[in-house]
Image (spheres, helix red, strand yellow):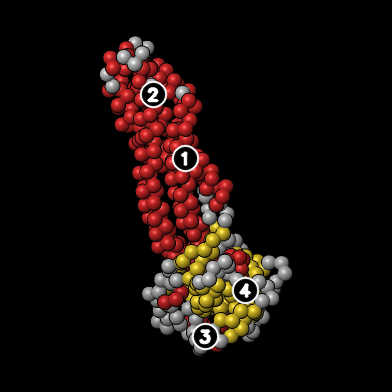
Amino acid sequence: MNFFSQVGAITGMNLRNIPQRWSSSLVAVLGIGGVTLVLVALLSIAAGFKVALEGSGSDDVAMVMRGGSNNELSSGFGPDTVTVVSDAPGIKKDAKTGKPLLSPELYVLVDGKMRGKDASTNLPLRGVSALAPQVRRDFKILAGGRMFKEGTNEVIVGDGAAKQYEGLDVGQTVRWGTTDWKVVGHFTDGGGIAESEVWGDTPFVQQAWRRGNSYQSIRAKLNSAADLKTFKDTLTKDPRVRLEIMSERSFYIDQQKIMSTIINVVGWTLAVMMGVAAIFAALNTLYNAVAQRVREIATLRALGFGGFPVVISVLAEAIVLGAVGGLIGGMLAYLTLNGMHSSTMNFASFSQITFAFTVTPQLMTTGIIYGLILTFIAGILPGIRAARQPITSGLREL
């Protein structure tokens, strides 16, 4: 028999005998499945966080902050800056009023009580203008609610925040600072970061937090994404202001980098640590498989089968166990986690952000490949041992 025929014959025999060793094989499969489940689960947090942020941004919306600022909390400017920005070219006009579509906004953090937890976390309260919905891509007030009235203590709550925090149902009143705020509606924004926030009227938020006439950011709806350069160049050259200007999409891409990096590092660190244990479980399984087939291997070697096909057959068995375990772990992650809402800290703004676990096909593939790598490593030593064991000692077992 040629080399490939030998590999096929021995590998087929090994795979057919797996059911006879189901208990030890199950240990390896479950070990790999557990590692894959944890890895995919943690990486799905980063994926969901990324979707919530990057999915929020639009290329035709300009994000304006004070020069040198990389987040809204460190930014700040007065009404004169708003006037200068509103006169810049490229801003889309409201069809009814002819006013520039821009929203000067104020961003503050309030205490929010998470559902089912005793501790409070930072909940973003954003003061926005009446035009804010028009500069968001997918803004929609949910049934049973309405937009807040300007000049009042009314607020609307993002759907993600409403699900994660207590006391934010429509009709309820919550106290932040020295002011009582009445919830009059819930809203969605295509699953974006705005759904983690509470919105109120900017002048009222300024008054409640004694911020005078200050703002921290301006969102300006442009005629098209191509107008961003003209808009930015005009304001950059204007000596009256010193501003940081970028597209809303670019802003959110920068915001998610820190958190995504942290989650990915933690995820892979845990996966490597658990992977070591999974390798030992797979090693034990494969060593037992080799020990149970001493006579078979010796007989095949005596009939002229080479040592390398034996090694490949053991590796093939390991890869099959890894593929099954990885697939089980990936499917469990998808079925139990995908779409589940949770929240985590946004280190760029030190506030909670709600997101949905996002188990993508790429993450499932990553988990399966990782399982294959672990079992391949585990199969090397047992494969070499099977190929090197003396034929004579194996035949004595007959």
Query: Which quadrant of the structure image shows residue 300?
Result: top left
For residue 360, above or below residue 60: above
Res 30 label: 1
Query: Which quadrant of the structure image shows residue 148?
Result: bottom right
Res 292 label: 2
Locate the N terminus and report the quarter of the image it occupies. Answer: top left
Q: Sequence-wise, which precedes: disc 4 or disc 1?
A: 1
Q: Sequence-wise, which precedes: disc 2 or disc 4?
A: 4
Residue type marked 4: Gly
Q: Residue at x 39, y 38 (%)?
A: 281
Relative to residue 109, is residue 187 drawn left or right? right
Query: Which quadrant of the structure image shows residue 203?
Result: bottom right
Q: CA distance from mark 2 to mark 3?
A: 75 Å
Q: Sequence-wise, which precedes: disc 3 or disc 4?
A: 4
Q: Position of residue 235 (x, y in %)?
A: 44, 76
Q: Which residue is mark 4?
A: 167
Callout 4 secondary element: loop
> Foreground mark, 3 or 4?
4
> Foreground mark, 2 or 3?
2
Res 209 label: 3
Callout 2 secondary element: helix
Q: Position of residue 396 (x, y in %)?
A: 31, 14
